[in-house]
């Protein structure tokens, strides 16, 4: 790959994680599995999409996001949607 083929871009990477996931799984496995998925669908997916971002890797207790418009997304995210 030549230098001319490399496309650079500025993006923010956000990693969200559930604190105490293992402890919560011991108490209520089904509910604990459902909660991050619901939050990912109801809040993160719509908020990220509104700001031209994408979910890079959904995981059991967390998610990694890429956001090309980090300022507007960060403001929206910190305001709780």
Image: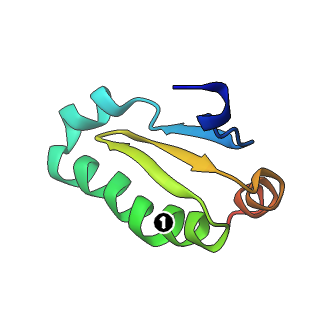
Q: Mark 1 packing: few (<14 Cα in 10 Å), some, or many (20+)?
A: some
Q: Residue at x 44, y 37 (%)?
A: 18
Q: Position of residue 31 (x, y in %)?
A: 23, 54
**Front residue of 76 and 70:** 70
- Residue for badge 1: 45
**Front residue of 29 and 4:** 4
Q: Residue at x 32, y 57 (%)?
A: 37
Q: Position of residue 8 (x, y in %)?
A: 69, 38
Left or right placement of residue 52 versus residue 58 in this view: right
Q: Which colour scheme appears in the figure?
A: rainbow
Left or right placement of residue 3 versus residue 36 in this view: right
Q: Position of residue 78 (x, y in %)?
A: 76, 55
Which residue is most to the left?
30
Left or right placement of residue 41 versus residue 50 in this view: left
| Residue 68, placed above or below residue 50 | above
Q: Position of residue 67 (x, y in %)?
A: 65, 51
Q: Residue at x 82, y 58 (%)?
A: 75
**Front residue of 24 and 7:** 7
**Front residue of 68 and 13:** 68
Q: How many marks?
A: 1
Quarter holding residue 38: bottom left
- Badge 1 element: helix
Left or right placement of residue 29 versus residue 7 in this view: left
Q: Quadrant of the C terminus?
A: bottom right
Q: Residue at x 69, y 53 (%)?
A: 68
| Residue 53, placed above or below residue 61 | below
């Amino acid at each position: 790959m030549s230098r001319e083929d490399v496309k650079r871009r500025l993006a923010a990477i956000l990693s969200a994680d559930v604190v105490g996931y293992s402890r919560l799984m011991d108490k209520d496995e089904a509910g604990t599995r459902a909660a991050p998925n619901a939050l990912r669908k109801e809040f993160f997916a719509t908020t990220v999409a509104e700001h031209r971002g994408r979910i890079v890797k959904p995981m059991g207790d967390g998610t990694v996001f890429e956001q090309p418009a980090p300022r507007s997304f960060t403001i929206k995210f910190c305001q709780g949607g």
